Image (cartoon, rainbow, N blue to C red):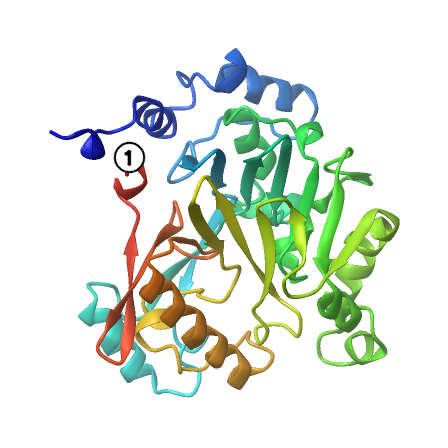
Amino acid sequence: MTASNDVSRRHALLLAAGGVSAGTLAVAGGASAQEGTAAMTQAGTVGAADTFPLAPGWRRFQLGEATVTVILDGIRPGEGPFPTFGEDQTQEAVGTLMAENGLPKDRFVNFFHPTLIEIGDQLLLVDTGMGEAGRANGMGLLRQRMAAAGHAPEDVDVVVLTHLHGDHINGLMEGDAPAFPNARYVVGAEEMAFWTSDEAKSGPRADNAKAVEAKVVPFQDKTTLLADGDEVVPGVTARAAFGHTPGMLAFEVVSGGKRLFLMADTFSQFVVSFQRPQWQVRFDQDKVAAAETRARFAAMLADEGVPIVGYHLPFPAMGYVQRDGDAFRFVPETYQSLIES
């Protein structure tokens, strides 16, 4: 076996750490997952062992000199994916596509993945999950699973918000206090402008605007507003991904010659979003723009071979995009990132 095909020992150890039970996991810094979870329990955040599906619910990847840790905040099974996905299609058409991919026709699972990025001397958290509001339904596990992965909320330097839907911002507060007390915040300028506008506050999205008022606006003095191409920290750049919301941003991470795109809700279902990017999605605010964004990014990612993390893709939410005729296909990460090149 040549050196170029050797698996990095560090990468292999990181992968192993992400796949063992929480009770035996040794994490960075010498703390155990048991110790981390115990600390969170003492703080009153969680009081039960992590026995949810796909526990321990985090996986770590190396990207050049940066470290990316994807956290599964929770899962939500339900009916679908029609009409949430393929809203402009028939239930039969969507069900047939699911069956062609070995999936149930009328049931699916949604996933929620905040992501930690260690780059330079900064720890970034991209989106914050369901928070307290989700815990009664087995979600809101970010803080517990961060502890298992070796990170305390106080460690976060920057909270990056891709957009301001509830499942991305609810974890900003813990009780009446900031969940990440030492962090500064970044969000798209157009996104913030919309959700604090009279249009949002008085229209059909008023409930979400109220959540923004409660969860995001209190941090406005510590918030930086971003436009397309702005840098969060060296190596992390905002990229316009408008359509799902008026100002949603994707984020490109570059380190050691490696690239990764955090795609937020651009691709929210791992079959429909890629194989039928033109199909409408119920929660896309501008459905035409959202479809154009999906197609544009899918083509670029496929042609350039850049991996992605998708907030709602199946755990661990990282993979690759391939062209498939006139459409695309999602290829989950298995061992690609472990091979030195």
Quarter holding the N terminus is top left
- Element on which disc 1 rests: loop
Q: Circle 1 is placed at which residue position? A: 340
Local crowd size for mark 1, using a 10 Å CA cut-off: few (<14), some (14–19), many (≥20): few
Q: Is residue 122 above or below residue 26?
A: below
Quarter holding the C terminus is top left
Q: Which residue appears at 68% of the width and 61% of the height? A: 164
Total marks placed = 1
- Hey, which residue is sitting farthest top in the picture? 30
Q: Which residue appears at 59% of the width and 82% of the height? A: 286
Observer able to see residue 270: no
Under mark 1, the amino acid is Glu
Q: Work out whether residue 46 or residue 31 is closer to the camera in this orientation and state it.
A: 31
Q: Position of residue 255 (x, y in %)?
A: 49, 41
Q: Which residue appears at 86% of the width and 51% of the height? A: 218
Q: Is residue 219 above or below residue 46?
A: below
In the rendered view, does 8 fall on the left or right side of 283? left
Q: Work out whether residue 117 or residue 94 is closer to the camera in this orientation and state it.
A: 117
In the rendered view, does 83 fall on the left or right side of 13? right
Q: Is residue 155 above or below residue 169?
A: above
Q: Work out whether residue 112 or residue 47 is closer to the camera in this orientation and state it.
A: 112
Q: Is residue 143 above or below residue 304?
A: above
Q: Which residue appears at 48% of the width and 80% of the height? A: 292
Q: Position of residue 93 (x, y in %)?
A: 28, 83
Q: Position of residue 141 (x, y in %)?
A: 55, 39
Q: Position of residue 279 (x, y in %)?
A: 40, 82
